[in-house]
């Protein structure tokens, strides 16, 4: 009879031990042996503090005492395993009474690993929040959180959200146990497991890639040797965007079941929602702050950035230079070559300006054929040199139209040094007057207001 019970207890995942009134182990099942990583012969007859590490032994001591006083005890606990993985355990102590004396003779400790259940609940709660609060400001943090919960739920090691751009596979968000995978890590798409998910345009789930028709001869298997893989394609605005994937080097004990696949597909939908919102926000930001023709900062953004730099000047006493650059005889260019050719000249001009200033300087389009430059230096020679480089490069690089026509053009520039009490408008007016003088002096030149 007892042998039957031992066999039964060994056949289940629940961790079971019987601990007597002296807190010595009298019975353990297979799952318990695995839990403490010791064979039964090394456990039976030993005291609790000889088997558990000192921190755990200290933690369970008062709880054991309550069970030995006849109380049914139940508690949840998160533990960190040696491999860094967190597990959530539900523990129950069931006291046993001596048939004759009625006194407590010990208790059964019944421990269930509820990590998957708790992670699934947390996953659903997070997904629910995402789907039911559209438009809420969300950061990439939510995606990382979903990846962490997904890894915990599926008991996998690597969770990734990756974008595919041509033949480039770019990791955007990751959660990895052990070696971290940095965002923006690139892989050739053909070497990735996700290339299969994208080609199939459906969920791909394997727990022994070595035996899978998809992966066994595939370069991805030779490169990464992952046995467990679950990948879901991600679509934004009707276009295939990338993948959500969970994987591990090791085989999973059980194949992915329908519930797991369904729940991870739900997670993928939530991630698609976040990515679509993010794209929309980026587009709005682009429209609000950038000029669509030249892709330089627009007037609003230029004024904001110059004002910010003026604040710094007031605090730190560091003046700088502002210049207005205006294309010469631009009306004639439009009239002669057409508006589209004029647009091309403006785009090229923007590129030349941007290419000839430094990273922390600014080139922005104020409107029409008028641009503003912020040269972040209080040295007039430095500022003049940068502007002169722009003027010369514009002059030396005509725009070539598709039919081979060359449009030669030039810019006139008015520059000024900022003063402590300056507002944007005063700076603009000084630079504009200097520009007016440059136009009067025959164009294709720089005039300083100071
Ligand atoms: N192609 C194109 N033309 C534009 C754009 N914005 C403004 N313009 C044109 O730019 C021209 C500016 O002409 P004006 O202000 O007379 O100046 P200009 O011909 O450059 O002469 P100067 O500045 O005196 O050298 C106008 O014909 C506008 O229609 C644009 O986005 N694209």
Image: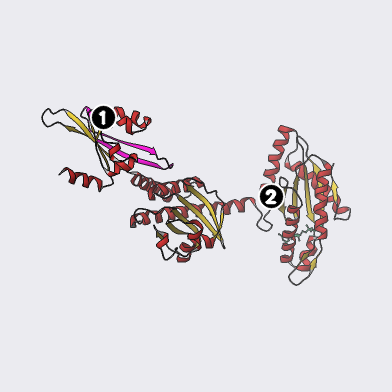
Percent from the top left, x then y, of residue 242? 50, 58
Q: Nearer the viewer, residue 317 or 338?
A: 317
Q: Nearer the viewer, mark 1 or mark 2?
A: 1
Circle 2 sits in a helix, a strand or a loop, which is it?
Answer: helix
Mark 2 and mark 1 in contact (Cβ < 8 Å)? Answer: no
**Residue at the limit of the structure toward the bottom, as seen here:** 403
Side (left or right) of 415 relative to 226: right
Q: Is residue 137 visible?
A: no
Region rendered in magenta = 67-93
Left or right for 102, reference 131 = left
Q: Which residue is mark 2?
A: 299
Instruction: Work out whether residue 56 or residue 366 is closer to the camera in this orientation and state it.
Output: 56
Q: Residue at x 89, y 53 (%)?
A: 441
Looking at the rendered structure, which numbered label has been put on residue 23?
1
Is 87 contained in the magenta span? yes
Residue 309 visible = yes
15 up-or-down from 65: above or below: below
Q: Is residue 47 magenta?
A: no
Q: Is the CB atom of the residue marked by disc 2 within 8 angstroms of ligand 1's nearest atom?
A: no
Separation (CA) of disc 1 from disc 2 = 77 Å
Under circle 1, the secondary element is loop
* Earlier residue among tags 1 and 2: 1
Colouring convention used in this rendered image of the protein: secondary structure
Q: Nearer the viewer, residue 277 or 23?
A: 23
In the image, farthest residue toward the front: 41
């Amino acid at each position: 009879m007892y042998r039957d019970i031992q066999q039964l207890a060994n056949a289940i995942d629940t961790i079971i031990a019987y601990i007597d009134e002296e807190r010595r182990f009298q019975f353990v099942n297979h799952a318990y042996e695995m839990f403490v990583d010791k064979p039964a012969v090394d456990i039976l007859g030993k005291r609790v503090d000889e088997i558990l590490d000192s921190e755990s032994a200290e933690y369970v001591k008062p709880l054991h005492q309550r069970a030995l006083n006849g109380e049914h005890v139940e508690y949840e606990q998160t533990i960190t395993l040696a491999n860094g993985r967190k597990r959530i355990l539900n523990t129950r102590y069931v006291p046993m009474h001596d048939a004759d004396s009625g006194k407590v003779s010990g208790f059964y400790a019944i421990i269930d690993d509820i990590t998957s259940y708790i992670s699934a609940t947390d996953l659903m709660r997070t997904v629910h929040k995402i789907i039911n609060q559209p438009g809420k400001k969300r950061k990439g943090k939510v995606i990382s959180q979903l990846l962490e919960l997904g890894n915990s739920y599926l008991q996998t090691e690597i969770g990734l959200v990756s974008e595919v751009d041509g033949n480039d596979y770019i990791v955007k968000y990751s959660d990895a146990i052990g070696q971290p995978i940095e965002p923006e890590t690139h892989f050739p798409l053909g070497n990735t497991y996700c290339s299969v998910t994208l080609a199939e345009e459906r969920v791909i789930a394997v727990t022994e890639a070595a035996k899978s028709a998809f992966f066994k001869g595939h370069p991805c298997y030779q490169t990464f040797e992952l046995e467990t893989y679950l990948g879901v394609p991600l679509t934004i605005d009707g276009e295939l965007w990338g993948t959500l994937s969970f994987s591990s080097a090791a085989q999973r004990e059980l194949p992915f079941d329908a519930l797991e696949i369904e729940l991870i597909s739900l997670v993928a939908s939530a991630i698609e929602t976040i990515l679509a919102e993010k794209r929309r926000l980026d587009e709005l930001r682009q429209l609000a702050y950038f000029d669509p023709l030249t892709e330089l900062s627009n007037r609003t953004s230029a004024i904001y950035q110059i004002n910010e730099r003026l604040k710094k000047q007031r605090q730190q006493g560091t003046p700088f230079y502002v210049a207005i650059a205006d294309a010469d005889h631009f009306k004639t260019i439009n009239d002669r070559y057409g508006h589209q050719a004029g647009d091309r000249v403006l785009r090229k001009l923007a590129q030349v300006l941007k290419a000839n200033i430094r990273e922390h300087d600014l080139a922005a389009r104020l409107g029409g054929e008028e641009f503003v430059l912020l040269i972040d230096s209080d040295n007039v020679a430095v500022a003049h040199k940068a502007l002169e480089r722009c003027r010369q490069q514009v002059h030396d690089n005509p725009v070539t139209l598709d039919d081979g026509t060359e449009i030669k053009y030039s810019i006139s520039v008015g520059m000024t040094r900022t003063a402590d009490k300056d507002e944007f408008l005063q700076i603009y007016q000084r630079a504009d007057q200097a520009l007016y003088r440059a136009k009067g002096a025959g164009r294709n030149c720089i005039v300083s207001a100071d």
